[in-house]
Image: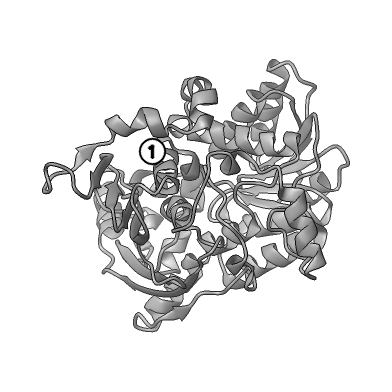
């Protein structure tokens, strides 16, 4: 059973020593445990200031010692609105970029940016991230970080070559329950872990088909791809529990999809004859279920369904030799408890295992909102890592590993649920890396 401690997740003071040791072993190209250069003030640019990007601007402006220096979007009105928001917060008007879909390249060439936040549609994540890193900027990229395995490798290799970090902006890793469970795992409450289950089950039919915002692009993959289109919200937290890329790694994935029915039926029931949406053919199954196996012999069930009429659920389940946790609603079972056939509520464990981030910034996070506060904590923590010269909590290898099931699931489904080998984006360094913790 690996050991975790409360200090490491909040930043390790030995990151520089670890990096030096890695260099002495001839593995200087890795970005594992590489600290940010310490900065008192962090200058941030945001590419994509629609709904998601605007919420990032809000959170960035709420963090001390952050200056938003540039914003970019293909819609000029959105750039103007973001600029006005920054000015209203008391900062200088940021530079605006809206001269075409590649104007982000001009933004990335500026010398007053330390970190680029990317909140564009999915297929632009990698082009923007590569441009930013090649121009000397660190990157925070929305999920999934990449669409294909080649793109995952492009992120990894560019991060290593440029020595710039590419952190996946997986807000679910900073959820209140997710961080409590991470603490419980670190304390050994569940014993040696054997199995996990996770998902992104979210009825997005209205959003997918609206004539604005994500409805302009997010439905299109459903006409071309059949697999798990959005794996990271469930897989990110579970990967943290299991120590993926930190003593264990994903080795194999098998996937299958149900038939497609719900999105077609919704469009037919919602839109009249003559609407072009009625002519679209959706190929992505309503429910995709993937099974992953790790090098240590653990298994993970990963699901995706954004078109069925069901309540929101990320499942978020972990099981070990001493007990189990399952969310939605949050409940826990510990071997030897009095009632062996019932779950306990998690309430009795909250005070002992509440994460320091929530203790420190929880009140402001909840006030700002953003998925219950996890959005702000994610941004606060990343800025804290830069200001204190720490390594990021999630690095480019996590961005690649958590995004890869999209391409792997599509390949498995297309091949009759044939097993797919999971790339080792760390090139073996997961064996040496210890699990950072809570």
* Number of numbered markers: 1
Above or below, 426 against 5 in this view is below
Q: Along the line of sight, which residue is nearer the eye, 410 or 38?
A: 38
- Residue 217: x percent and y percent? 51, 53
Q: How is the image coloured?
A: one colour
Q: What is the quadrant of the N terminus in the image?
A: bottom left
Tag 1 secondary structure:
helix
The answer to whether one can see residue 206 in this image is yes
- Residue 162 located left or right of residue 200: right
- Residue 256 located left or right of residue 427: left
Q: Along the line of sight, which residue is nearer the eye, 399 or 426?
A: 426
Q: Along the line of sight, which residue is nearer the eye, 386 or 27?
A: 27
In the picture of the structure, the residue carrying the numbered disc 1 is 177
- Residue 123 located left or right of residue 316: right
- Residue 28 located left or right of residue 302: right
Q: Along the line of sight, which residue is nearer the eye, 434 or 98?
A: 434
The residue sitting at 41% across, 63% down in the picture is: 228
- Residue lying at the far right in this picture: please name it: 111
Bin the neighbour count of mark 1 within 10 Å (Cα to Cα): few under 14, some 14-19, many 20 and up. Answer: some
- Residue 355: x percent and y percent? 47, 33
- Residue 306: x percent and y percent? 34, 53
Above or below, 145 against 412 in this view is above
Which image quadrant for residue 350? top left
Which image quadrant for residue 397? bottom right
Above or below, 369 against 239 in this view is above
- Residue 114: x percent and y percent? 79, 41
The residue sitting at 65% across, 39% down in the picture is: 382
The residue sitting at 47% across, 30% down in the picture is: 373
The answer to whether one can see residue 50 in this image is no
């Amino acid at each position: 059973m690996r050991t975790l401690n409360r200090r490491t997740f909040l930043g390790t003071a030995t990151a520089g020593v670890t990096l030096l040791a890695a260099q002495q072993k001839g593995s200087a190209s890795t970005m594992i445990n590489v600290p940010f250069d310490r900065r008192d003030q962090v200058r941030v640019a945001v590419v994509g200031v629609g709904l998601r990007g605007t919420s990032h601007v809000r959170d960035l402006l709420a963090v001390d010692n952050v200056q938003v220096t540039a914003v970019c979007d293909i819609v000029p009105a959105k750039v103007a609105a973001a600029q006005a928001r920054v000015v209203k917060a008391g900062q200088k008007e940021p530079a605006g970029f809206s001269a075409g879909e590649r104007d982000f390249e001009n933004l990335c060439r500026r010398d007053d940016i330390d970190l680029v936040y990317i909140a564009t549609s999915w297929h632009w994540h990698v082009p923007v991230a590569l441009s930013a890193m090649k121009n000397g900027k660190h990157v925070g990229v929305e999920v999934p970080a990449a669409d294909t395995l080649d793109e995952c490798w492009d992120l990894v290799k560019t991060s290593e070559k440029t020595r710039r970090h590419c952190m996946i902006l997986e807000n679910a890793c900073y959820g209140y329950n997710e961080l409590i469970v991470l603490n419980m795992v670190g304390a050994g409450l569940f014993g040696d872990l054997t199995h996990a289950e996770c998902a992104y089950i979210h009825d997005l039919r209205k959003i997918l088909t609206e004539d604005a915002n994500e409805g302009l692009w997010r439905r299109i993959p459903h006409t071309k791809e059949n697999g798990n289109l959005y794996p990271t919200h469930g897989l990110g937290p579970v990967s943290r529990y299991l120590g993926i890329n930190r003593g264990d790694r994903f080795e194999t994935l098998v996937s299958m999809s149900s038939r497609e029915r719900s999105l077609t039926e919704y469009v037919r029931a919602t839109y009249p004859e003559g609407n072009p949406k009625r002519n679209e053919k959706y190929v992505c199954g309503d429910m995709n279920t993937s099974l992953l196996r790790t090098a240590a012999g653990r298994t993970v069930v990963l699901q995706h369904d954004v078109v069925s009429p069901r309540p929101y659920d990320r499942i978020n389940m972990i099981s070990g030799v001493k007990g189990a946790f399952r969310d939605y609603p949050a409940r826990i079972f510990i071997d030897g408890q009095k009632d062996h056939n019932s779950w306990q509520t998690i309430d009795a464990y909250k005070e002992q295992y509440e994460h320091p981030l929530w203790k420190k910034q929880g009140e402001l996070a909840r006030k700002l909102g953003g998925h219950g506060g996890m959005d702000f904590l994610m941004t606060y923590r990343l800025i804290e890592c830069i200001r204190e010269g720490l390594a990021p909590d999630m690095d480019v290898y996590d961005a690649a590993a958590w995004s890869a099931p999209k391409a792997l699931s599509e390949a498995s489904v297309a091949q009759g649920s044939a097993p797919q080998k999971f790339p080792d984006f760390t090139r073996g360094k997961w064996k040496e890396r210890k699990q950072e913790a809570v």
